[in-house]
DNA sequence: ATCCTCCCCTAC
DNA sequence: TAAGGTAGGGGAGGAT
């Protein structure tokens, strides 16, 4: 079902030529940089032709050297600085700035500060090296780029540096954020900031002024009435929330066409207006942005744009609530999502307490109970666990500074529209008395409680309070397991305090005093019972369940209260007449395991007895990272989807990079509207959906956004879905590795290990079997369609059906399928490895093959004799390059082993129709590109698009072209090929790019499916080498860009003709591309490592 | 048996 | 209008 194919590798040469910022840097004329230029945006050369003759192949290496030199200079200057080493010299330790644009003081002065005070100064932006971007102001046009490329890095005014120096300590950068961004971020820290938490920002206990500033409620001016906005909680509300969600999904099903919501609507309209009037008396103001008084006053001026949680004020007035209307939907959405906040909080915690999460043995030393013994896996004679949970966290945090609201029913919600479907996130206890629950629509909540006060989220305050919360916990205990922002387990078995109830009350009191919010605690001998105890303790209490009381406590406890039992399991148990733990306990463990599975059965058996062997531990390393959006997702066409996927991939890539990991398995999830589902009850909700997913595993881990995009596109193609039915999209990455792992000579990177791997075999075979129906998703014209079918019956496909098959049981092609000429032209290291793959028989095969050709003895014998001969393996040393090249008399279109009739048949055509590579609509034609195409190409395109409306434009614009009556044989490009196909080393030295030649090679010798041909294709890619950066590529216009970006991160010459021919190549290769992609990516690291050194200079390899 | 994919369930 | 995410665990069923 799923076609497993994959791509990818880490972007090689990141630090050299493939870094857009590097190559841009060279073109910079002014000392003051702009972000756009530095990050590759808007940096096209003014004249392409002017650039064409520049020694651009050297740009990468030039920049690499230059950067290196700058670093060395900086280091030398820093080490000679009289300040270094002194206590004050390290103010900026760990800070690495990139100065963008004009600043006061100048970037050179800022550099001086960094030099003196232990920081770093980056001349060119690198997401991996830079920790802060320094910027005085940015034109609006740059803001978007900034968001896209900063990767969550703080963008801060120079004053931060100056004042830090003045204070002789590193101040928090947050008050110095750039105004534009601060305004946008005031509601919630930029999403990516979760993952790039600035380690230099000392964890702060909010002081009173900050609290006041941050937590003031405000009026929603645009609605002309009062509305309190801010925050909410997770925890105990979530059970109800889940239940409500489930109920709602059910109600949206086909069987419930007209339900209560209609009636409810009429009801609430009359009921709710009075409460609106009442609420309008309340007035609050807000300046939620800042942590400093001065900043607060600044932000008052642009209050409306700075409003917390107010996309409605930050964005144009029309509704920007769906993927259709908001181009930055993904980013904006996450900023306001409470579930996203809850879901990503753990990352923030990991960053804040890294020592607690990177291993099972590391512990933070705790001055309060130093000397406490490490807990072993064996239970002590007495275990004591305290579970602490803040009470209705989201609400409590928001209203803690508003005594006038105490005792009143308050809930956190995005909207207080009394007819709306915004969800109550958290309700305080007075509200709960009215039946207001988390997960409820606000309209339903208002029906139950018309005087309900709605307050908005304040994610920033939640973070702050959570930090305070954990600071307190860590002070009292060195074994803290974070569950969420407001909930944690403490293992206090080893603490000196003997009275655990006293300890719990001390901690709770401290939490209240520090945060202004109450917390409840449960005390028991294991995590399960402690957590259950907390439920009893709430609100604002604590409860101890001693071992002797466990049985009694559990006997009447509903099974639903046990962690791990949700509504589904509850229902299953209910069907067996099991509602309480007391009823569950008599059931035999085997019986439970039979009914619910091994693990779940055992869990039920244990939990019903209060048995829980888990130990309070550390946060484990994450196993997967992903992002999904299931609200506001609506698409009209494939372009919409592509746009969304692109943004989603950016998001996921940033998260991967932020966590310093790369992944190998990629899962794309789609929520598809059920065919019989109507409009969702919830505004912009996903309604009644079926969930679909497809997975791909690639040989090498990546965090590269381009790779993610291609994978996502590829995965999406597997769904065959009407884009109008999509209600949610998610991308998850698993099989994570540390970002540095792949660089350390990972075994998996070897050709042998990859080609012989199970997944590789599987993927190849799947791909091959999929080829006849291989669908390439091309977004260029906004529709999904099949690729050109001209290659039907392609070599690979036919090969798959041939007797020999592509792979034998070892997962490599039969020896006789190899193209000797190609093998010989490989670098010795690669030949050596391939030789190993064949158990040392390759070299013998090569000599035998050469003899065979010389003897013109064409058929049968050779293959067999090679395989069986056991010819002595030539010493690698003797198989010198010169020797190999000397033997290149082998016809390049001759493929060893292709001596059977069907093999000859499937050799790809020697010519192709230019129609195959034509743009399908005028919109795909970039006029600047068009203008520079060879005349005959232009003519063809005009003819091809003749039936399109607007083709006259082309004729008019380039009348000189259309007027020419040059007769060109459209079906034959052979005249454009450059010389004879040289061997690849020669091509490497040919600066005019052997692409054209290679193109010939592929199709003349195309014996698809066998390694020889693949290698030829792959080698060819290597020579599409980097001329300009991607900017030059971007200049090629939308048509080229759209086409290329799906398939290849190619660094290409600015020569338009070459670009055009690359397209030819890629299009023709598309049908076997997935297969090629994997081989290519498996080989590249080898080539790069061995060849770069072997042949000197920078080997510029395009990445797929 | 063991692994994998494609789900589902659950907690927060 | 509204922001229904994130991640771990496990089961079914298929491939090897």
Image: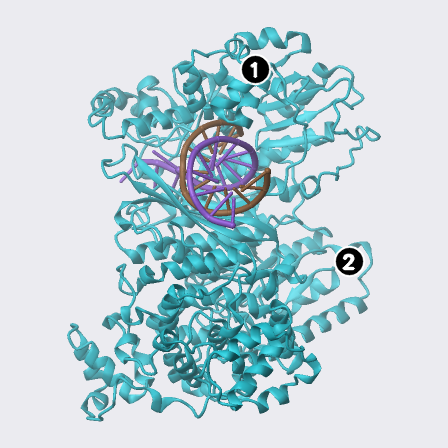
Chain colours: A cyan, B brown, C purple
Q: Which residue is mark 2?
A: A89
Q: Secondary structure at mark 1?
A: loop
* Residue A623 image point, x, y percent: 57, 44
**Residue A852 numbered tag:** none
The residue at 75%/37% (across/down) is A363
Left or right side of A572 for A641: left
Q: Is residue A70 visible?
A: yes
Taking the spot 56% from the left edge, 77% from the top edge, the residue there is A865
Residue mark closest to the camera, 2 vs 1: 1
For label 1, the crowd category at 10 Å Cα-Cα, with few meaning under 14, some 14 to 19 and many 20 or more, is many
Mark number, residue A608: 1
* Residue occupying image coordinates x 25% and y 77%: A915
Relative height, residue A42 to residue A986 (above, below): above
Of helix, strand and loop, which one carries label 2? helix
**Residue farthest along the front direction in this orientation:** A861
How far from the left and from the top, in percent, is residue A888? 54, 89
Evaluate whether residue A15 shows in this view.
Answer: no
Marks 2 and 1 sit apart, C-alpha to C-alpha, by 60 Å
Residue A145, position in %: x, y? 45, 61
Q: Nearer the viewer, residue A115 or A15?
A: A15
Q: Chain of mark 2?
A: A
Categorize mark 2 by other alpha carbons within 10 Å: few (<14), some (14-19), many (20+).
Answer: many
Which residue is at the front of the view, A204 or A124? Answer: A124
> Which quarter of the picture shows residue A985?
bottom right
């Amino acid at each position: 079902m799923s076609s497993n194919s994959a791509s990818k590798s880490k972007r090689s040469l990141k630090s050299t030529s493939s870094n857009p910022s590097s190559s841009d840097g060279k073109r910079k004329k002014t000392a003051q940089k702009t972000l756009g230029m530095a990050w590759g945006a808007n940096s096209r050369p003014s004249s392409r032709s002017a650039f064409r003759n520049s020694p651009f192949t050297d740009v990468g290496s030039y920049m690499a050297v230059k950067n290196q030199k700058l670093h060395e200079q900086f280091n030398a200057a820093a080490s000679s600085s009289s300040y270094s080493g002194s206590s004050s010299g390290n103010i900026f330790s760990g800070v690495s700035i990139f100065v963008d644009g004009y600043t006061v003081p100048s970037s050179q002065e800022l550099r001086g500060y960094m030099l003196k005070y232990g920081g770093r100064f980056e001349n060119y932006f690198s997401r991996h090296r830079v920790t802060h971007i320094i910027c005085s102001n940015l034109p609006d046009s740059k803001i978007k780029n900034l968001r896209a490329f900063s990767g969550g890095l703080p963008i801060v005014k120079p004053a931060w540096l100056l004042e830090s120096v003045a204070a002789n300590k590193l101040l928090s950068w947050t008050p110095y954020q750039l105004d534009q961004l601060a305004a946008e971020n005031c509601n919630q820290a930029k999403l990516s900031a979760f993952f790039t938490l600035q380690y230099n920002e000392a964890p702060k206990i909010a002081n009173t002024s900050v609290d006041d500033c941050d937590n003031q409620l405000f009026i929603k001016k645009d609605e002309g009435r009062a509305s309190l906005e801010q925050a909410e909680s997770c925890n105990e509300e979530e059970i109800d929330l889940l239940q409500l969600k489930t109920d709602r999904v059910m109600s949206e099903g086909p069987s419930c066409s007209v339900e209560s919501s209609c009636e409810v609507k009429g009801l609430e309209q009359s009921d709710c207006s009075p409460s609106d009037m009442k609420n309008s008396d309340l007035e609050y103001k807000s300046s939620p942005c800042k942590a400093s008084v001065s900043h607060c006053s600044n932000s008052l001026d642009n209050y409306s744009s700075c409003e917390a949680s107010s996309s409605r004020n930050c964005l144009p007035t029309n509704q920007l609530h769906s993927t259709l209307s908001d181009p930055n939907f993904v980013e904006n959405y996450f900023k306001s999502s409470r579930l996203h906040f809850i879901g990503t909080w753990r990352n923030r915690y990991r960053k804040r307490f890294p020592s607690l999460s990177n291993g099972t043995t590391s512990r933070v030393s705790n001055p309060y109970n130093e000397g406490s013994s490490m807990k072993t896996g064996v239970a002590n004679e007495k275990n004591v666990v305290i579970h602490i949970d803040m009470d209705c966290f989201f609400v409590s945090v928001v209203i803690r500074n508003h005594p006038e609201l105490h005792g009143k029913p308050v809930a956190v919600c995005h909207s207080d529209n009394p007819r709306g479907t915004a969800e109550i996130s958290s309700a305080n206890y007075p509200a709960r008395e009215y039946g207001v629950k988390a997960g409820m629509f606000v309209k339903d909540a208002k029906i139950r409680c018309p005087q309900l006060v709605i307050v908005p989220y304040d994610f920033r305050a939640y973070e702050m309070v959570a930090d305070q919360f954990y600071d307190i916990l860590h002070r009292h205990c060195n074994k803290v397991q974070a569950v969420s922002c407001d909930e944690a387990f403490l293992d206090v078995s080893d603490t000196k305090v003997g009275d655990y109830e006293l300890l719990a009350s001390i901690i709770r009191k401290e939490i209240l005093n520090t945060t202004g919010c109450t917390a409840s605690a449960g005390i028991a001998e294991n995590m399960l019972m402690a957590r259950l105890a907390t439920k009893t303790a709430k609100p604002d209490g604590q409860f101890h369940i001693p071992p002797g009381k466990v049985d009694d406590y559990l006997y009447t406890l509903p099974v639903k209260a046990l962690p791990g039992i949700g509504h589904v399991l509850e229902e299953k148990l209910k069907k067996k007449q099991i509602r309480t733990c007391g009823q569950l306990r008599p059931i035999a463990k085997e019986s439970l395991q039979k009914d619910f599975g091994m693990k779940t059965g055992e869990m039920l058996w244990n939990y019903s007895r209060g048995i829980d062997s888990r130990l309070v531990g550390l946060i484990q390393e994450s196993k997967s990272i992903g992002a999904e959006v299931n609200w506001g997702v609506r698409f009209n066409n494939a372009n919409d989807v592509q746009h969304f996927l692109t943004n989603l991939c950016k998001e996921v890539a940033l998260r991967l990079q932020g966590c310093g990991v790369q992944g190998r398995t990629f899962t794309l999830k789609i929520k598809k509207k059920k065919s019989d589902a109507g409009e969702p009850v919830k505004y912009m909700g996903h309604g009644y959906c079926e969930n679909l997913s497809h997975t791909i595993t690639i040989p090498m881990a990546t965090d590269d956004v381009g790779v993610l995009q291609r994978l996502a596109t590829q995965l999406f193609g597997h769904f065959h879905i009407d884009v109008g039915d999509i209600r949610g999209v998610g991308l998850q990455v698993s099989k994570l590795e540390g970002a540095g792992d792949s660089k350390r000579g990972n075994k998996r990177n070897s050709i042998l290990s990859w080609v012989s791997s199970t997944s590789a075999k599987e993927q190849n075979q799947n791909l091959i079997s999929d080829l006849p129906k291989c669908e390439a998703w091309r977004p260029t014209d906004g529709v999904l369609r099949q690729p050109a079918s001209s290659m039907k019956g392609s070599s690979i496909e036919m090969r798959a059906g041939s007797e020999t098959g592509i792979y034998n049981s070892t997962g490599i092609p039969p020896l006789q399928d190899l193209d000797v000429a190609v093998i010989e032209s490989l670098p010795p290291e690669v030949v050596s490895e391939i030789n190993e793959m064949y158990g040392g028989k390759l070299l013998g095969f090569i000599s035998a093959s050469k003899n065979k050709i010389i003897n013109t003895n064409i058929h049968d014998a050779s293959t067999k004799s090679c395989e069986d001969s056991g010819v002595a393996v030539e010493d690698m040393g003797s198989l010198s390059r010169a020797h190999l090249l000397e033997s290149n008399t082998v016809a390049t279109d001759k493929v060893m082993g292709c001596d059977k009739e069907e093999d000859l048949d499937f050799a790809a055509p020697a010519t192709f129709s230019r129609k195959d590579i034509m743009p399908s609509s005028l919109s795909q034609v970039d006029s600047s590109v068009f203008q520079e195409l060879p005349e005959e190409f232009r003519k063809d395109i005009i003819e091809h698009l003749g039936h399109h409306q607007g083709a006259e434009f082309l004729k008019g614009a380039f009348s000189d072209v259309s007027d020419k009556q040059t007769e060109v044989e459209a079906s034959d490009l052979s005249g454009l090929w450059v010389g004879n196909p040289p061997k690849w080393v020669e091509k490497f030295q040919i600066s005019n790019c052997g692409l054209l030649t290679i193109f010939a090679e592929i199709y003349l010798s195309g014996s698809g499916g066998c390694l020889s041909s693949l290698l030829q294709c792959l080698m060819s890619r290597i020579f599409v080498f980097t001329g300009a950066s991607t900017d030059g590529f971007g200049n090629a216009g939308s048509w080229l860009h759209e086409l290329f970006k799906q398939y290849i991160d190619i660094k290409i010459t600015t020569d338009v003709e070459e670009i055009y021919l690359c397209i030819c190549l890629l299009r023709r290769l598309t049908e076997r591309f997935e297969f090629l992609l994997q081989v290519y990516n498996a080989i590249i690291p080898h080539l790069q490592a061995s060849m770069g050194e072997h042949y000197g200079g920078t080997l510029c390899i395009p990445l797929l």
